[in-house]
Amino acid sequence: MTVGTAPLLRMEAITKRYGGVRALEDVRFECDRGKIHALLGENGAGKSTLIKILAGVVQPDSGQITLDGQPISFNSPAAANAAGIACIFQELSLLPDLSVADNIAITRPPMRFGLIDQGAQRRLAEEALARVGGEDIHPLAPVGDLPLSRRQMVEIAKALARTPKILILDEATSALTAADVTKVFRMLKQLKADGMAIIYISHRMHEIAELADDCTVFRNGRYVETFAAGTKSDDAIVEMMIGREYSSVFPPLPEKKSGGPSMLSLKGLSWAGQLNDINLDLKAGEVVGLGGLDGQGQRQLLLALFGTLIGVTGTIEINGKAVKMSNPGRAKSEEIGMALIPEDRKNEGLMLPMSVRDNLSFASIEGFSRFGIVDRKAEAVAIDDMIKLLNIRVGDIDGPVASLSGGNQQKVVIAKWLMTKPRIILLNDPTRGIDVGTKQELYELLRRLAEGGAAILFYSTDYDELIGCCDRVLVFYNGAVVRTLEGAALTEHNLIASAHNLPTSTKAGAAQVFATEAAS
Amino acid sequence: MSVESGLSTKGGRSWEAWGHWFTAQRGLLISLVIFAIMFGFYAWKLEVGLSASMVNTAANKGALLALVAMAQTIPVLTGGLDLSVGMVFVLTNCLAASVVNGDPRMTALGIIVVLITGLVCGIINGIIIVYGRLQPIIVTLATGAVFFGVALALRPEPGGSVNFEFADFMTTSFFKVPSSVILLLAVVLFIWIPYRRSVLGRAAYAIGSSEHAAYMSGVPIARAKIMAYALAGFLAAIAGLLLTALTYSGAAKASLGADYTLNSIAAVVIGGTSLFGGAGSAIGSIFGAFIMRTVGDLLIVFDINPVLQPLFVGIVLLFAVSLGSLRLLRIKNKLDLYR
């Protein structure tokens, strides 16, 4: 591969507005063959917009893009594909009813006699899967039947099968298991060595530290700086992203309380081989974390508590009284007072086309109603309080919730549930894909809620978060709690060791081990 | 049906491959089994035995609905619906009763004109839906009314005629196989299977599965949708031709068009195609159509008042749909119900 003097891709003076909102203002970006270029910034910084422009999903209002020295512009994803740009999106671009092979070959299927060649397509899919390390996936399986982490591997294989010049990964690893991440990283390094240009977006700093050659930071739709990876400290990078002094993200943990009666108590909870004999005592004012590798039963526990699973055995006691959780309506009732902040805010948390106001009052609407008629005044007062409490930045409260940024959408989901005045709050990975600033606000909110007497169960895939926010952490492995970590034993090293069902070290916080390394 | 599956069982995991094939074709196989049972019952109860002419009559009745149902299947696969298929069927019937006449050359030309008319009707639907960005239901409801209006203008009173050789050819049997069945086979072999394996056919499934993801994957959405409705119009025109051959005339009857439209949707669902789009097959719709027609024949051999036919068709429809949702009983996470 001959490397010219001009970079492979150059974007200059790119500006994009949505209505009155400025998404990108006079931004530049370059990337070259054989390099992994990380794009950093908070949510709303403009990273996604830049990627969408490259992928042909949206068109810039002004600016120039050159590929191999030639000016280009894409009016559709198909055009971007044809130019050799492949994108792996955070939101999957897979067709659930079609087979894995159909999906991988969807853009340019192999043809014979004018028709799609099924055999060639299957071989193509098998090769692509083998390259990303997804040999366990059957090419004829319907994509909709695969678990999320397998679907993400198919998505990566699909992008690779197009043999792109530029590969873009937008939070592509967020749904993967640690073992998959290792495989994908190995593959990315190989692709880089083969001369591909890779643009990498992630909120996980350690992934960027491991992969990137160059980093570019965006803030508020503007270009901030480009620098070689490893030349700045994590703190300095975070400061660049949020544009202010970066103090401790986590509020201080309170003194250990002497306890009290437990609000939620589980005895021998099991379900369908995915939850095995879970025991738990959760007291008012406690934040208890659920840790471990992704997909070890943490989500199922939250769903079982919220009444969406059928055939759960064992007992659930609320304030010492055994209850049967039959459905979410029952879980949120006055008697139980439970709320679940779901992981998938677009499908389970929000009605995207409906207004912010309607979304906020959905879960608590009965509380504002008399004889089925909604008391609009009481509703408005409660909504105002919530927007202030969570500092939600809404342009128009009657506008669609889809127009808010990711972080603000997530705040709406949380506010919606806080409006039911829950006493037991279940959180299912609530900070996934959310910017640092909003995360910090959320951590403080959690603490305040706990101080106000709520009991909180907090599942997170981010180890720092578990350490910074939780009084103790239950580590899951294969559907069971293998260890409870608290106090000085609650360290990244111990979390990772326990997640792999290894013995913990007594040297608290001595080792800085990344999940990916531990998995390999 | 192995033609459609395109299985390459080279290497290992062939059992798994068959498993996935079976899952994908389950709706079709269920409709095939129901039809086989019903028809077997009918043939067994029939004391005189099945004569060639009875098979022929049964096949002709079924083939009309089967063709309209195949037409309906393709828009449904894209996640749409075509409420005008029945009216295209009526319109082409009226047109055929005027133009499929005269010497063989004129007759052939007439057939081509009828088929092109159906195709154009479908293309009009597709263009309005794609470029007007409108809901298929309301667009085809409107165009259906327009097509029926044209049919009425062409033939205010029932009548007309058709080339007799052509009519005989379409209604006879070859080696005891009714020509309407041969016609269905030909449509499957030369239209459906090539379409199913073409890029635009694949795109139709992709759009029905997730239009957003299809767009992000660079699938030609506009062309695929127009093609789907165009093919629907074309297949409905073939049905219109067959109807003309069976009745030797054309009639602009609104109830006929509406009946065929609604029954085609039922046949599509019985045949295992999802109304949400993305999964199913036009071959299933053929069996769906024959199941609906066999209900009437069964009523006759069981000496039940044929007036009750809609009641039994309804029960069969409910039964077939329930079979499709049996898997929901195995669900252990209620959230899976909403996927």
Image (tube, grey):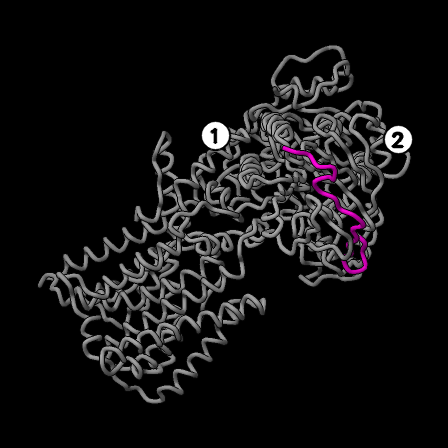
Q: Identify the residue at the far bottom of this view.
A: B157
The residue lying toward the viewer, choosing from A12 and A252, is A12
Q: Is residue B66 visible?
A: yes
Q: Identify the residue at the far left of this view.
A: B48
Q: What numbered label is drawn on residue A247?
A: 2
Q: Which residues are magenta?
A: A1-22
Q: Is residue A452 visible?
A: no
For badge 2, the amino acid type reads Ser
**Mark 2 vs mark 1: in front:** 1
For badge 1, the amino acid type reads Asp
The residue depicted at 57 percent of the width and 34 percent of the height is A149
The residue lying toward the viewer, choosing from B35 and B68, is B68
The residue lying toward the viewer, choosing from A369 and B334, is B334
Q: Position of residue B259 (x, y in %)?
A: 36, 73
Q: What numbered label is drawn on residue A444?
A: none
The number of discs equals 2
The residue lying toward the viewer, choosing from A395 and B313, is A395
Q: Residue B10: name its quadrant.
A: top left
Q: Give the letter of the chain under mark 2.
A: A
Q: Give the letter of the chain under mark 1.
A: A
Left or right relative to A327: residue A223? right
Left or right relative to B127: residue B92? left
Q: Position of residue A152 (x, y in %)?
A: 57, 37
